[in-house]
Image: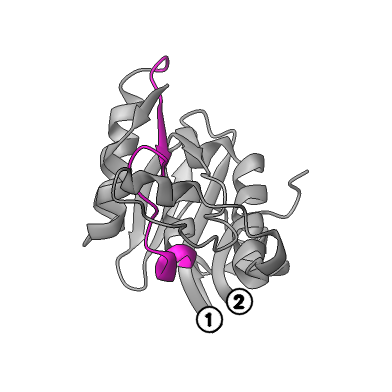
């Protein structure tokens, strides 16, 4: 895998997350032996905006390719001192073991657990299902794995799944743990911040 120095800047400035995802997915689809390793923060560059680590965590953990979590991005670790001789030392502050951002950490954990179960997130064909609110699917070319994701959602919603999940299929929102039955190409459920749909029979 090549380290993807591109993602940090583009995740901060991206007007369209879908365009970024589609570009990466197309590049990865071009060669089975090619991969990229994306990150938000790095000791070689800078820490990602600490006020945006929730949305940035979603952007990274749902990205095509490989992902790398720089310590403390998942827990809200603040930057350290900034010596004039080496500003990058600010990226190497002590881990914030005594002040972990518990809700942020829970968010990252759910995304990470979902990602670990679904190779489609990393290697599947990317498809936008809906522009607003944003919904996308990733499906392996051989159909062995498939997911539908709504990165930001709250309350009672209906998530369009197109033909990714069959009519009548039972799906689970891995973020909230709530089940739904696909009816008329949609899954109706109560969202808890993010929707991560998988078939109910996932191991």
Magenta residue span: 32-54
First in sequence: mark 2 or mark 1? 1
Magenta segment: does it hold 162?
no
Question: Is 33 in front, or is 158?
Answer: 33
Name the residue rendered at 59%, 45% in the picture. 115
Q: Quadrant of residue 55?
A: bottom left
* Helix, strand or loop status at disc 1: strand
Q: Quadrant of the C terminus?
A: top right
Which residue corresponds to mark 2?
192
Q: Residues within 10 Å of mark 2 (few under 14, many from 20)?
A: some
What colouring method underlies this structural image?
one colour
Q: Where residue 184 sits: x, y (%)?
A: 51, 69
Q: Residues within 10 Å of mark 1 (few under 14, many from 20)?
A: few
Name the residue rendered at 46%, 45% in the picture. 138
Is residue 129 depicted above or below 34 in this figure?
Answer: below
Q: In terms of secondary structure, what is the magenta stretch mainly?
A: loop
**Label 2, label 1: how far apart the Cα atoms are:** 5 Å
Q: What residue occupies the far top of the structure in this picture?
A: 33
* Helix, strand or loop status at disc 2: strand
Q: Mark 2–mark 1 contact, CB under 8 Å?
A: yes
Q: What residue occupies the far bottom of the structure in this picture?
A: 155
- Whether residue 96 appears in this view of the structure is yes
Which residue corresponds to mark 1?
154
Name the residue rendered at 39%, 53% in the picture. 47
Q: Where residue 182 sits: x, y (%)?
A: 60, 65
Question: Is 80 in front, or is 24?
Answer: 80
Q: Where residue 26 sits: x, y (%)?
A: 29, 33
Q: Quadrant of the N terminus?
A: top left
Name the residue rendered at 76%, 49% in the picture. 201
Magenta segment: does it hold 35?
yes
Is residue 14 depicted above or below 183 in this figure?
Answer: above
Q: Quadrant of residue 27?
A: top left
């Amino acid at each position: 895998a090549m380290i993807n120095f591109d993602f940090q800047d583009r995740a901060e400035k991206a007007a369209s997350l879908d365009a970024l995802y589609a570009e990466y997915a197309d590049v990865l689809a071009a060669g089975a032996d090619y991969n990229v390793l994306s990150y938000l923060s790095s000791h070689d560059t800078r820490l990602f905006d600490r006020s945006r680590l929730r949305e940035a965590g979603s952007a990274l953990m749902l990205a095509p390719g490989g992902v790398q979590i720089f310590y403390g991005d998942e827990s809200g670790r603040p930057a350290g001192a900034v010596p004039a001789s080496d500003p990058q030392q600010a990226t190497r502050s002590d881990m914030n073991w005594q002040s972990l951002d518990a809700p942020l950490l829970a968010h990252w954990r759910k995304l990470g657990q979902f990602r670990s179960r679904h190779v489609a997130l990393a290697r599947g064909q990317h498809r936008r299902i809906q522009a607003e609110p944003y919904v996308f699917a990733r499906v392996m070319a051989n159909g062995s794995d498939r997911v539908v994701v709504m990165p930001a959602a709250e309350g009672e919603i209906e998530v369009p799944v197109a033909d990714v999940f069959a009519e009548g299929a039972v799906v689970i929102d891995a973020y909230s743990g709530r089940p739904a039955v696909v009816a008329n190409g949609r899954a109706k459920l109560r969202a808890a911040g993010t929707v991560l749909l998988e078939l109910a029979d996932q191991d």
